[in-house]
Image (cartoon, rainbow, N blue to C red):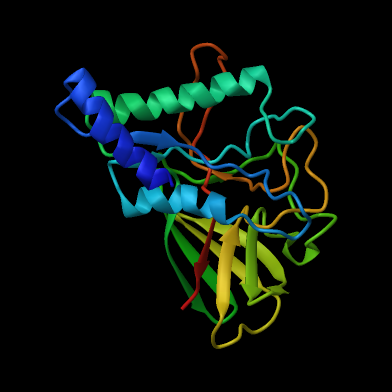
Amino acid sequence: DMLTLFNSYNQDLAGLTGQTGPIPMLLSQQHSNPMTAGSTSPATLAQWQIGVDHPGQILCTGPKYQYAYVSDYTHLINTDYERLGAKDAQVFYQRVVLGHPWQPLQPISASRSGRVITVTFEVLVAPLAWDTVLPAPHQASNTAWAQGKGFEVSNGAAPITISSVAISGSMVQITVASDLPTSGVTVAYAWTADAAPRANGTVRWGLLHDSDPFVGYLTGMPNQNYAVAFEMSVP
């Protein structure tokens, strides 16, 4: 549906406006639906994957879990809609006005060695860092991942306990508490809903961001790039 919308815009609007170049689509991930404890959101995954499949044409500007939400856990407060708008404007300026390539903070690959899974990221502004203000996810539910700072490791439907996570350059190294199965292992981030949303937040979130110094004009607040929500297989 998103791709159909993108193609319709390019087919219809170009003829009306006289634009000769492709019209990019900018979108951001949602993290609120479904809200059922333990559920995952294929729509959220698709909102990232479509940018991977159509680079330069469809741009996932990133997640929205880092922002403050109102009591429905779905809509943002006014100030953070301004922060979201500033992020969209930043991406638009870089990609459309300046013509520079732009990608969100996203995983490139996953590998493993013993009990350590390494996820390599495409990092816009190094170094990677952990948010120190947001509470850690998975503290009251999905507690096998309580030490994951938003990362999740599973074997099919069975969670695998995370012992620790650590940043190493453009990589995050995830150490699990037991030997990994030979197949069927997945690593995810901000993917599984907790039983209760975080205060002023939503049900899926994580703590990983880059060091982009960008500050929104209206809010005067920092607006780093936070890691997209994802799930991927570990070979």
In which quadrant of the rendered view does residue 97 lie?
A: top left
Where residue 56 sits: x, y (%)?
A: 27, 42
Q: Is residue 67 visible?
A: yes
Q: Residue furthest top?
A: 218
Where residue 80 sits: x, y (%)?
A: 62, 23
Residue at horizontal 54 percent and vertical 42 percent from the top: 29
Above-or-below relation of 161 to 90: below
Residue at horizontal 55 percent and vertical 88 percent from the top: 182
Above-or-below relation of 11 to 1: above
Compared across the picture, whether 86 is left or right of 64 comes to: left
Compared across the picture, whether 203 is left or right of 92 comes to: right
Above-or-below relation of 141 to 83: below
Q: Residue furthest left?
A: 20
Where residue 233 sits: x, y (%)?
A: 50, 72
Compared across the picture, whether 9 is left or right of 130 comes to: left
In which quadrant of the rendered view does residue 129 lie?
A: top right
Comparing 50 with 198, the one in front is 50
Residue at horizontal 48 percent and vertical 53 percent from the top: 46
In which quadrant of the rendered view does residue 26 lie?
A: top left
Comparing 91 with 223, the one in front is 91
Residue at horizontal 67 percent and vertical 30 percent from the top: 75
Q: Is residue 124 visible?
A: no
Above-or-below relation of 112 to 29: below
Q: Residue furthest right?
A: 140
